[in-house]
Amino acid sequence: MRPNLFLLAAPRAGSTQLAHWLASHPDIGIPPVKEPNFFSSHEFCPRLVAREGLNDIDPEGALPPRHPAQFAVFRRAQDYARLYRGLHMRWRLDASTSYLACPEAPNRIAASLPRARALCLTRDPVERALSHYRLALRTGRTRRPLTEELADELAGRTPLAARFLLRPSDQAAGLARVATAFPGRHLALRFEELIADPRPQLDRIAAFLDIDPAGFDLDVRARNAGVAPRFAGLNHLLHRTGLRTPLRRALPPALKPALKRLVFTRHAAAIDPADRAALERLL
């Protein structure tokens, strides 16, 4: 089997929660890796992937993994196809958040899978970028002020796949590419509407996919909320040394919730008003 449903969402726009709701429907299957990034893999330099520990699993290794994974860069078609073995549902999902910002991805998907359909999920660009910056602080990806990250991205000093502020927030360009690649086969959704009242949006998705709207389980919740690190220096060290991903893989799933409560606080990192204003001027 091959994927035939794509969730082209901006990062930090609720794609993980929506993917959980989609997977709760008996007519929709999700592979063991939510974001395989196959159609945007050319944007991910192998050295960057290795240095940043982006692969939650080895894309060329044994599948399925012991536990569901969030992100990996699948470069070989045979490995990507293996992800979908055993998924016999009517709709089979790829929810890679890199596709919306990637100029080539929508056309590549449409050329390879001409009958596929696309769901687009977007968010207020400023709030999306701030959420992504808080995530970068939480994971240890950065400890720098927001304005320094913006300056590097504007100057082109940040590698393409590592640009997490401005590029993913340019969602209008991505939506236009999807509309061209999937004429009559795409549905646009808004994060704010989905989170405020999910049922009407899931009803729209059900009508778009011709499935029973009662099949979605709204009680399914994703654990992807915004939190702040208690020990920012430790998180940054683990990220820069490449130890964060191996440690995450090695931890038993039963221990992860308790460890997260120890390492992170529920209070989101405060954003300097001047930094926010600088971001707003650019978006």
Image (cartoon, rainbow, N blue to C red):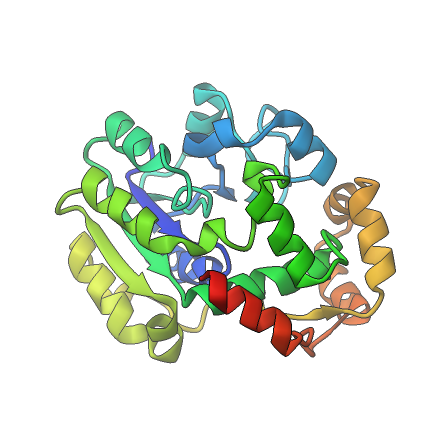
Q: Quadrant of the N terminus?
A: top left
- Work out whether residue 85 can be spotted: no
Q: Horizontal placement of 202 versus 160: left or right?
A: left
Q: Of all residues shown, which one is farthest toward the left?
A: 184
Q: Does 101 appear above or below 165?
A: above
The residue at 62%/41% (across/down) is 158
Q: Horizontal placement of 260 versus 276: left or right?
A: right
Of 247 and 151, nearer the camera is 151
Image x and y of residue 210, in percent: 15, 55
Of 259 and 138, nearer the camera is 138
Asked where in the image residue 2 lies, by quadrant, the reply is: top left
Image x and y of residue 280, in percent: 49, 68
The residue at 25%/32% (across/down) is 110
Image x and y of residue 56, in percent: 64, 41
The residue at 35%/71% (across/down) is 194
Q: Does 221 appear above or below 84?
A: below
The residue at 83%/48% (across/down) is 238
Q: Does 2 appear above or below 71?
A: above
Q: Horizontal placement of 8 versus 242: left or right?
A: left
Q: Quadrant of the C terminus?
A: bottom left
Of 234 and 154, nearer the camera is 154
Q: Horizontal placement of 222 versus 7: left or right?
A: right
Asked where in the image residue 85 lies, by quadrant, the reply is: top left
Image x and y of residue 100, in percent: 38, 46
How many labels were placed on the picture?
0
- Work out whether residue 279 can be spotted: yes
